[in-house]
Amino acid sequence: MRAGQPGYSAAMRRDHTLMDGAIVMDGPVLAFGGPYSNLEATEAVLAEAARRRIPSGRVVCTGDVVAYCADARATSDLVRGSGIHAVMGNCEESLGHAAADCGCGFDADSACNALAVAWYAHADRSLDAGTRAWMRALPRRLDLLIGGRRLAVVHGSVRQINRFVFASTPESEKNAELDHLAHGGAACDGVIGGHCGLPFTQAIGGRLWHNPGAVGLPANDGTPRVWYSVLHPTADGVEVELCALGYAHERAAAKMREAGLPAGYAEALMSGLWPSCDVLPPAERAQRGRPLRPGRLRWAGALEPMAALS
């Protein structure tokens, strides 16, 4: 949904107050990751923000605006013009600086790395100088104040833009990343991260690690749905709502086939299954094809499950 399209109003682009370098969020925050050049999915998630009356200043993207799908330029233009907040992903870092590859962190001999050659070349051909300059200017970290808590939005991990952090990543490693948040700035209560493509929410020693998932590809759960979250401020913390999103995935897949992009990723939009699980740890690999469920968690130091949503 572009500025000027139905459902988008000027009131949804207002600026927010800064406090100690953090953006003060005065209401629910919609978070999503990985648009991945999937224009249809990106339009759908921005339409969800409008439907929920969440202004663009309270929408945040964890990066990788451009990747696997067909519409690199159009998706970049949409995100760039929408007024939402976004952090730099490894794809923005690479494309912004005209690097030779996506910098995704794939093993050199992996199927993911081989598939990346085609989609990265397609994206690289699609972008103009203005889009690359916008990518270079994106911040690597944004801090939000919501529900009395300070949360850092990053792409991969706090210290490494292309590090894969999964639900199964050891707590000791997440703790080390969370500890690093205070270096050179204000202490934070948690992280909103991306990159791994799978949604999860955990409390690590009372601090939050939340990944809202990606909208550009399904979550390897055997359904074509994609994922985002809404963080609702409460009197003593944050309520995290994980949300599934349907969109015109058939159209997005058809455009990928027309562009000659790897068939495996076009098929993934339809089947909900990734063409390769090279990057996944054993625990996440074992969940392949098991449908995820929307739900809510209340975080006030610890996580309190709430009723799952259908």
Image: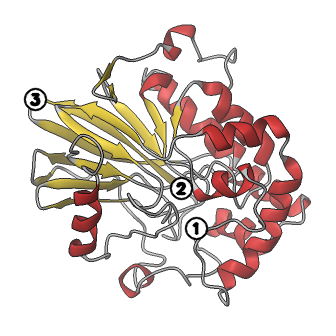
Instruction: Note whether residue 172 is visible.
Output: yes
Work out which residue is located at the far front of the displayed protein and give it: 184
Residue flagged by tag 1: what amino acid is it? Gly
Residues under labels 2 and 3: Cα distance? 32 Å
Q: Which residue is mark 1?
A: 272
Q: Which residue appears at 10% of the width and 44% of the height?
A: 300
Residue 79 in the image, given as x and y percentages of width and height: 64, 35
Q: Which residue is mark 3?
A: 235
Q: Amino acid at mark 2?
A: Arg
Element under label 2? loop
Q: Earlier in the sequence, mark 2 or mark 3?
A: 2
Between circles 2 and 3, the one closer to the viewer is 3
Q: Is residue 141 left or right of residue 248?
A: left
Answer whether residue 310 is visible to the viewer in this image. Answer: no
Q: Which residue is mark 2?
A: 225
Contact check, label 2 and label 1, Cβ < 8 Å: yes
Q: Nearer the viewer, mark 1 or mark 3?
A: 3
Task: Locate residue 54, reporting x and y percent.
Answer: 42, 24
Q: Residue at x 17, y 54 (%)?
A: 207
User: Which structural element holds mark 1?
Assistant: loop
The N terminus - image quarter: top right
Q: Nearer the viewer, residue 284 or 89?
A: 89
300 lies left or right of 273 = left
* Vertical arrangement, residue 108 with respect to residue 249, above or below: below
- Image-quadrant location for residue 216: bottom right
Image coloring type: secondary structure
Query: Which picture quadrant has residue 255?
Result: bottom right
Classed neighbour count for the residue bearing mark 1: other residues with Cα under 10 Å, few (<14), some (14–19), many (≥20):
many
Residue 251 relative to residue 242: left or right: right
92 and 298: which is toward the camera: 92
Residue under the image location 25 percent in, 67 percent down: 176
Q: CA distance from mark 2 to mark 1?
A: 7 Å
